[in-house]
């Protein structure tokens, strides 16, 4: 299978020091990390302590879950037959730094760390290209620096940004992504400094966790109505860890609004559902679990069988076990699309020959 969401992390903050210029290493040691979201480092929600992770993911040799490549191989890559694993670096990261020059240096350090510590010793892993997205000029420079390196499978951006990501200040990033054939990967959460929900800061973690789906819907709406996909018809956008059952109903509602108010957005000549089926892909985790499992099959049919990519979210606590998802109403042809074929089509991975069982999926 292709796992589209694996989270590596440093063993200690000093793991990035070798990749930071002296100036910025001293800056980090003296002033620390000053992010756009003022509460990010202080949140008491349990997902941040420790490292959002499941209890059995602690490496036996020490370190935080997601910091030990050998243990990742033993616990996840080998038993689940992961042919390609896409890394999603949540922390440390330069993407949210208020000091954009320091943020650019941190992004470069994270990118180099991924290559040295992960993708070079383990060719099954592919890196996400982290960029300082609030400074599009430096973001494009970072893309250009790594363009053509096959270790990088996509460009990482955060959906909860300072402005809606469809706005034109971000368009140079999309232009560079298309020029180099790299999808944009938008992982749930972000740093914009705004409440997690449209009605303020929630009281409970369950509310916060659900808000990833809401931010994804706002993001998709912005990209569509701002005309991003019309301006960049070859842009590929992958939505990661924000659910997917909302996609059909959102498309229906946006199509209705577009039909009634098309004169306000003449730069969007097609209904939003057309862009959903052409430019957007969505990962499966956290898996939807309706009371009637056949309804899950219906949702996938409504959104398009080629739109869904499998992901586990390893090593986080809400990890999806590939042997336990898609249990009812899924034939082998569809399962091969979800576990392997769809991701290979989006990212351009070479499709391997089927295993002896007739399927390259984990068994």
Image: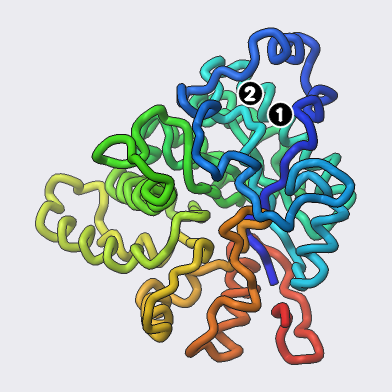
The colour scheme used here is: rainbow
Say whether residue 350 is visible. yes
Callout 2–callout 1 Cβ contact below 8 Å: yes
Residue nearest the viewer, comparing 328 with 4: 328
**Could you tell me residue 15's position as x and y percent?**
81, 30
Q: Is residue 258 above or below residue 64?
A: below
Q: Residue at x 50, y 69 (%)?
A: 308
* Quarter of the C terminus within the rendering: bottom right
Q: Which residue is mark 2?
A: 104
Give the SS element for disc 2. helix
Task: Please say if 10 is above or below 74.
Answer: above
Which residue is found at the position 47% from the left and 42% from the top?
189
Image coordinates for residue 241, horizontal then vertical, percent: 51, 55
Give the quadrant of the N terminus.
bottom right
Q: Is residue 229 visible?
A: no
Q: CA distance from mark 2 to mark 1?
A: 6 Å
On the rendered structure, is 339 left or right of 285? right
- 160 in relation to 28, above or below: below
> Which x, y percent locates residue 154?
62, 49
Of helix, strand and loop, which one carries label 1?
A: helix
- Disc 1 packing (10 Å; few <14; some 14–19; many ≥20): many
Q: Quadrant of residue 49?
A: top right
* Nearer to me, 247 or 8: 8
- How packed mark 2 is, by other alpha carbons closer than 10 Å (few <14, some 14-19, many 20 or more), is many
Image position, residue 86 (x, y; %): 68, 55
Q: Which mark is residue 92?
A: none
Residue 108: mark: 1
- The residue positioned 38% from the left and 44% from the top of the image is 204
Q: Residue 345: name its quadrant.
A: bottom right
Residue drawn at (61%, 50%), measured in percent from left and top?
Answer: 182
């Amino acid at each position: 299978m292709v796992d589209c969401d694996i989270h590596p992390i440093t063993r200690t903050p000093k793991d990035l020091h070798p990749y930071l210029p002296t100036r910025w290493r001293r800056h980090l040691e003296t002033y620390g990390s000053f992010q756009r979201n003022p509460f990010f480092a202080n949140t008491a929600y349990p997902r941040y302590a420790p490292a959002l992770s499941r209890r059995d993911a602690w490496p036996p040799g020490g370190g935080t879950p997601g910091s030990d490549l050998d243990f990742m191989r033993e616990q996840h890559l080998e038993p689940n037959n992961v042919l390609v694993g896409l890394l999603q670096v949540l922390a440390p990261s330069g993407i949210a730094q208020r000091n954009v020059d320091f943020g650019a240096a941190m992004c470069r350090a994270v990118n180099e760390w991924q290559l040295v510590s992960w993708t070079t010793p383990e060719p099954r892993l592919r890196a996400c290209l982290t960029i300082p997205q609030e400074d599009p000029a430096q973001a494009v420079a970072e893309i250009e620096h790594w363009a053509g390196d096959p270790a990088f499978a996509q460009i990482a951006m955060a959906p909860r940004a300072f402005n809606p990501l469809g706005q034109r200040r971000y368009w140079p990033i999309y232009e560079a992504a298309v020029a180099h054939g790299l999808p944009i990967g938008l992982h749930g959460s972000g740093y914009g400094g705004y409440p997690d929900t449209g009605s303020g800061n929630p009281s409970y973690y369950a509310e916060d966790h659900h808000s990833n789906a809401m931010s994804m819907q706002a993001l998709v709406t912005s990209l569509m109505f701002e005309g991003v996909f019309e301006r960049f018809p070859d842009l590929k956008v992958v939505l990661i860890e924000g659910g997917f059952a909302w996609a059909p109903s959102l498309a229906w509602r946006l199509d209705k609004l577009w039909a009634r108010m098309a004169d306000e957005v003449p730069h969007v000549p097609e209904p939003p559902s057309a862009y959903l089926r052409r430019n957007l892909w969505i990962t499966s985790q956290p898996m939807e679990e309706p009371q009637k499992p056949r309804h899950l099959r219906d949702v996938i049919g409504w959104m398009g069988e080629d739109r869904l990519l499998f992901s586990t979210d390893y090593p986080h606590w809400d990890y999806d076990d590939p042997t336990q998802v898609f249990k009812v109403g899924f034939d082998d042809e569809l399962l091969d699309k979800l576990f392997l074929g769809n991701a290979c089509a989006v990212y351009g991975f070479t499709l391997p020959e089927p295993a002896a069982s007739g399927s390259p999926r984990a068994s």
